[in-house]
Image (cartoon, rainbow, N blue to C red):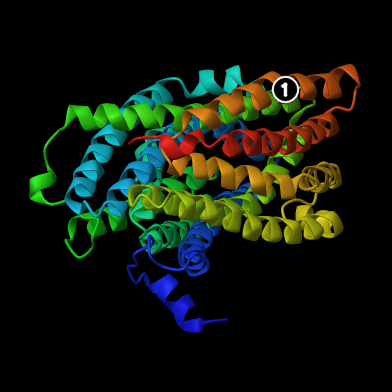
Amino acid sequence: MNFQLLKDAIAGKEQDFTKLSLKTAIFVLAVPMILEMMMESLFAVVDIFFVAKLGEKAIATVGLTESVIVLVYAVGFGISMAATALISRRFGEKDYHQAGSLAFQLLLVGGAISLIFSVLGIFFASDILLLMGAEEEVIVTGSRFTQIIFAGNAAILLLFLINGAFRGAGQAHHAMRSLWIANGFNIILDPLLIFGLGSFDGFGLEGAAWATTIGRGTGVLYQLYHLFNGKHRLQITAANLIVKWKTIRKIMDIALGGMGQFLIDSVSWVALTRMNAEFGSTALAGYTIAMRVLIFTILPAWGISGAAATLVGQNLGAKEVGRAEESVWLTAKYCMIFMASVTGIYLFYSDELAGIFTDNQEVKDIAAQGLWVIALGYVFFAIGMVLTQAFNGAGDTKTPAWINVAVLLAFEIPLAWVLAFTFDLKYLGIFIAIAIAHSLHAVVAYVFFKKGNWKRIAV
């Protein structure tokens, strides 16, 4: 291994990704993106590790709340995709001033939308849990957790969209470090605010919400410092502090496709979680643990695939279309190797992994079953993730959105319902539907990518 290259990737030496060799470019981009996504996945794993000690009702509350808060993630994801597509294209064109102006407009859009989510979450937390099928005890004990998470959603949105801007600029190390900082605070604050220390009794489940919100908020402060300190190619200067409605409309046009992708994925997730709720808190707890553990490996794979988005955007901006396509296939190869390796871990050690989070044998069995069943489709997941990121990096966010409509809404949800209820497979039927649907998603994405329409998108 070239340790100097690894050092450069982590330290954040700025590169011209339209000239650097593709293998080197993927490595330099993917390393901090993988580490970034591992930190993001640690949020989920750390929270559920400590919350699980509060019992099944607490786990169910987190699962139900996050199945709705993904709507915030959807908006953040959409704006993040717009940020990566637009800023990577400007960097490919070497128009750094316009990139800074775009970054400012992104902050305006994210801040305005987060206010709406805050108000809705604060006033309708109990209704949200009730709508998701929560038991009465879960609503009584968990509504405050839901309120805090929604009230602090600005930290989620800004963390997403600013990191999208950093990745588009090829400054993935800043995105990585912001997640390190955010997760570091979360790890320290979680046990302290949940269980207390000394004479301080802690806040129980509410403490988990405060720890996550404070952690993410600290990460955002780090991001803003590096956007405004004037030390990098991507910077917001006084000349950029002008509202440009045309640019905001362009951001929203691209972001809507990205939001659509994540919203459809989220609707599917909400529907599957709601189906699981029909089988009681034990089944829901097992499902929640399985999803959290799976996210731990899916997000690093998403980090690898993120290299494709940056390379596609910057190389299209530099009019290097062939190089853009070549970067996608090379990234897909590396992502498949990673996902194949973790598949083996889930197949052989699912019981041990589930046992880390719960001592309840029934919950553990359900979680373990979910891990090895869903992992059977992991290699296909890798292809689908890379191709989706390639579309998004080109600014073609609508094609993946329509693929999600066809596969996740029209296919996955009905399939899960039939397997779970008609064939009485219960939660196993839902796990099987997830593995099949996401494998099909990769096949459909491949067909559309080969058509090549993404090469002609103007942003």
Judged from the image, the secondary structure of the residue bearing numbered disc 1 is helix
- Residue type at the position of mark 1: Phe
- Residue drawn 33% across the image and 28% down it: 252
Number of numbered callouts drawn: 1
Q: Position of residue 144 (x, y in %)?
A: 48, 32
Quick check: can you spot residue 196? Answer: no
Circle 1 residue: 411
Identify the residue at horizontal 51%, vertical 44% (top origin).
390
Classify 317 as above or below 122: below
Q: Is residue 97 visible?
A: yes
- Residue 177, relative to residue 218: is it above or below? below
Q: Nearer the viewer, residue 383 or 197?
A: 383
Residue 428 is situated, as x and y percent measured from the top left of the image, at 85, 34
Q: Is residue 88 left or right of residue 354?
A: left
At which x and y percent is residue 427?
Answer: 81, 31
Q: Is residue 80 above or below residue 8?
A: above
**Residue 426 percent across, percent down from the top left:** 85, 27
Instruction: Give the side of residue 103 with respect to residue 162, left or right.
Output: left
In the image, farthest residue toward the left:
239
Is residue 306 found left or right of 67 in the rendered image?
left
Can you say which quadrant of the picture contains the C terminus?
Answer: top left
